[in-house]
Image (cartoon, coloured by chain):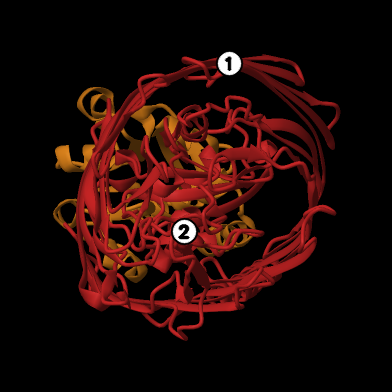
Chain colours: A red, B orange
Amino acid sequence: MGVLVFYTVFTRCIFIFFFLLQVAYGQNIDSLLDRLARKDDLSVHTKKETAGYLTIFTRQDLDRMKIKSLSELIEKIPFVRYNEDSLGLSDPYYQPYQKNNPARIRVYIDDRELLSPLFGSGFQLFAQVDMAYIDHIEVYMGLPSYEISLEPAVVVIKAYTKTGKRENTSVVGVSGGTYGTEDVYGYSSKDLQDYSYFVYADYRNLKREKLYNRGSKLSRDKMSNNFYAQIIKPNSKFYFQAIKGSMDNFIGSSWDMTPRNLSTDFTNLFSGYSYNSTDKSLQASINYSYLASDYFDSSYSPLGLNPIPFPPYYAPYFSNSVKTKEHLLDAKIAKKIKAGDFSLLFGLRNRYKQFDVKSKKDSFIFKNDTYNHEDVASVFTEMDYLFNQKNRFILSLSAERYFEDGRVKSDNIYGIRVGHIYHAGDFTQKSFLFYGKFRPTPYMLLGNDSLPIPQDNLDSEEAYAISTKSIWKNKNMTTSLLFSNISDKNSIYYDLSSFKNSNSRFVFNSISFRNIYMLNDIDKIDFNAWVVFEDYGANSSDRYINKYGGYIALFKKIGKIDTYNSLSYRDGYRDLSAGWNYSTTLTYPYSKNLSFYLKGENLFKDALKTNYYRVNLITHQTTYLNDISVFDRRVWLGLEYQF
Amino acid sequence: MKILLLTILAISSLLSSDIGQLKAQILSTIAHALIDKDSLNVCLDDKDLESSKKYAKSLKFVSCNKADIVFTSKVKDINMKCKTGLVFATSYYLYRHSPMVVGAFFWQKGRPNIIFRKKQLEKLGIKLPREFSKYVE
């Protein structure tokens, strides 16, 4: 009897103790579901830890931020400062008169690269459009594995779409924002046992702050219609995407920043099929992209000079119409073989790029008849050896042949990446060595090829990188410290007549610290601080530049209201003032099916600013447009209804 | 005994961090909420939940026709062999297309979700603990 009483009292005490612990820990079925949502996020199944230094924005993060476009996330990526070029397009590395360098940031949607055959990276296509069809985003820093991205890049952004299997619902969202911005989207998705589907459509009319110069309106408005559909079967996936829209191109090429009529209409179509064997050992995909744009620029001041056959042998032009049509056929197959602790990935990829450019500068007509396609054949391999339970070694090799058209020289590009990962308990150390080349884009090659005296000797940029990251992880906290040294040779720049390689070697030494502290199953504080010490060589007037940045973000549920607060900082950029961006989102679930949200961006109106200037080659006057916010101060009010 | 069982569930849930453990914990919680028995015979027929089997210590995994409760995503399980126990769907499709299913554990809008079918609960005379009431529809 005594034993029974003791047993009863003991078990009840234990139960009460753990019940109280559960209460303190928020432990119930809700809490279990919250925890599973975090632990079994889709990114857990798509991320590749050995591929590089990874930052993940999970489905929950994006939902709680009510993310509107990829540009918002750029300020969360170390060593990168969001910026926009003179056309109002996103370009974190924008410099006046320089062209977008695609080797810096590349974007993938699921496993297909968003690639502009002419301009390179598809970052500009994706940065300011809607994102409600995206589930989560993985950012790989520092020249990641060829399995992730065959074309080398400093930052690779992989956006993964929502899937029918994880959505199983229909949703409509409506929001309005400052300056008259409107956004309406809806999607329907279902898991139908043998297959799942996801269909999405969005209309967005993004209105930006207007600027005026000498009576000319400088607008960066963008309107887009986006349709995306996918069908997923256990081993295969088919998708189709169409984006059609128009945008105002801000300053354009106007020498005095006095545009009269300046806009681009665009139509982008993407379609593809991919196969993945059940054991994931065989992957194959084929993707087709069609990008068409119609750019028109007319100005009160000259846009450029046309050659004429009599003195002074040039004449200014005031209107420019450029129509481009780009086709990309991208096929890839990769096989992974595993033998004990050793695995070997071997792959082949081919990208056929065709581009037609027709421009009319006043009456001067140009057509790219001499150079209109590029074919890239690639072979790559990755060896992964688990030496013991703590040490893993990785070796990646790639070789690419660029078959060029016309006078442009074909080229071979090689890359090598060596990695070591040490993992013991709560500690992980990742280290990588990298050597690779960044091929100039067809746009750069075409520019040099179209000169009166063609210059077809533009070399690829070369990069060497050594980096290491220490990660400490326990139940509630993840802390990491990253060091990297990147050396860049043959850097490409535009000298106002042609693209050239720099003689200087650029060296970037970087340190980044990050700490994520989980307050409970869903709430967290995320902190990052970084510094880059840049050396542009003895020939540079500003040889040494130190850049700083970071952010602190708090995701916290207060009662029924979900809150997100973030403060980001960037400083040290040449001629640019420091930027502080405070953003917040409040989400109120009115019912199980209906939620309202209020989102504020750049609320202090002290976020990143940039400077633009234009030189009039006839009057020799320079026009400046300084301290222009690249993030508008904007408030969104929206609702989402789930059927 | 019931208290001991709940205690074990509480302890294991506090310690669980692995996905398989969490899924096992959720299945256990659902099963014990539906059936007031200390030892439950469970049939699990869903490859996405297979990893949870080794963690669900309070459940005994048996074949479909011996189970107190069947967790499945397959229509054929309901139509053919699993007629003895409660059926709890692990896919929304099965829940929507099989009125006899008492509830479902599935992903919706990017997060895991559970639903209990009120009509079926009433028909079977099942009264759920209060914390589940918001999942009944």
Q: Is residue A475 above or below residue A342?
A: below
Type of amino acid at the residue the image marks with label 1: Ser
| Residue B132: x %, y % from top left | 33, 65
Q: Nearer the viewer, residue A426 or B130?
A: A426
Who's the residue at 55% across and 64% down the image? A75
Which percent across, then down, holds residue A377?
A: 54, 14
User: For the point 42% across and 59% down, which residue is it?
Assistant: A86
Q: Secondary structure at mark 2?
A: loop
Please state, as top left, top right, bottom left or bottom right, where the N terminus of chain A lies in the image: bottom right
| Residue receiving disc 2 | A617
Q: CA distance from mark 2 to mark 1?
A: 35 Å
Eyeballing the image, is A305 above or below A414? below
| Residue B67 x/y as whole percent | 37, 35
Task: Report the amino acid beneath label 2.
Answer: Leu
Q: Are marks 2 and 1 on the same chain?
A: yes
The circle on residue A410 is 1
Question: In the rendered view, does A401 fall on the left or right side of A69?
Answer: right
Position in image of residue A275 (x %, y %): 41, 19
Examine the rendered structure and indicate whether residue A436 appears above or below residue A226. Answer: above
Quadrant of the drawing holding the C terminus of chain A: bottom left
Neighbourhood count class around disc 1 (C-alpha, 10 Å): few under 14, some 14–19, many 20 upward: some
Q: Secondary structure at mark 1?
A: loop
Based on the displayed image, in which of its 4 quarters is residue A412 positioned? top right
The chain ID associated with circle 2 is: A
Task: Depth check: give the residue in front, A199 or A207.
Answer: A207
